[in-house]
Amino acid sequence: MKRKLGIALLLSMLVLAPMHAARAYVYIHNDAEYSVDLPEAPKAASIWADQEDPIPYLDNPPKYGFVGEHAWLKRADNDTGDVFSVDITFLKADRDFLLSLTKDKMIQAMKDQFMDITLDNEEEHYSAGTDTLKWATVTGFSTDQANTLHYKAAHYLSGLDSIMVIKVDYNVENQTFQKYYDTLANSIKYAGK
């Protein structure tokens, strides 16, 4: 009896595991050090040193070549009009810049993302690993013009030779979007080189 139950449990895990994996798209650029699970593949554009738009976050961006990638996605609920949006910026960074990243500098860079809005219940989190591996997060709530409550989060991830910034905004009343964010937040991981 125990053996049959064990085999049934194993088979159900094998059948359900691919279904769970198919629900998320793992975003990671070939040159990036962090990965994150998204509800679908984002749109993306390369960031070049000679582009017209300024390169964000870096004190002294490279003068030539490929610098990083900007990826984004918006998913809308057809019934309610609610929107779940993610904006990701990956940038190659030199060691001096990465060593200069302090808790205050990283937190302030994330707070700057919300300069034009008031965040209620704002929270800051920071952790540092070995060498230049660091993670800063700022989260909070805001209301839009329709008086809808939104959750906003900005994660700043520092690697050994790159950074990744992940910004998220969604309607907190939408349970599906809450699940998307929970998956995203719990899936961020250092993948290394």
Image (cartoon, rainbow, N blue to C red):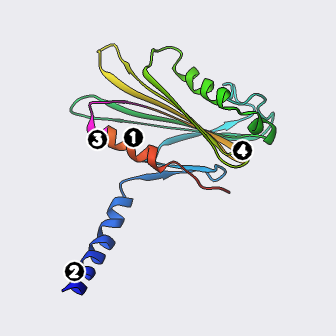
Residue at the disc numbered 2? 5
Which residue type carries mark 2?
Answer: Leu
Q: Note whether residue 188 is visible.
A: yes
* Left or right for 109, reference 177: right
Along the polypeptide, which appears first: circle 3 or circle 4? 4
Which residue type carries mark 3?
Answer: Thr
x%, y% of residue 100? 76, 33
Give the magenta range.
169-177
Q: Is residue 38 magenta?
A: no
Tag 1's secondary structure?
Answer: helix
Quarter of the image with the N terminus is bottom left
Label 3: few (<14), some or many (≥20) within 10 Å? few
Mark 4 or mark 1: which is in front? 4
Q: Is residue 171 magenta?
A: yes
Distance from label 3 to label 4 (Cα)?
A: 35 Å
* Left or right for 17, reference 67: left
Tag 4's secondary structure?
Answer: loop
x%, y% of residue 131? 73, 47
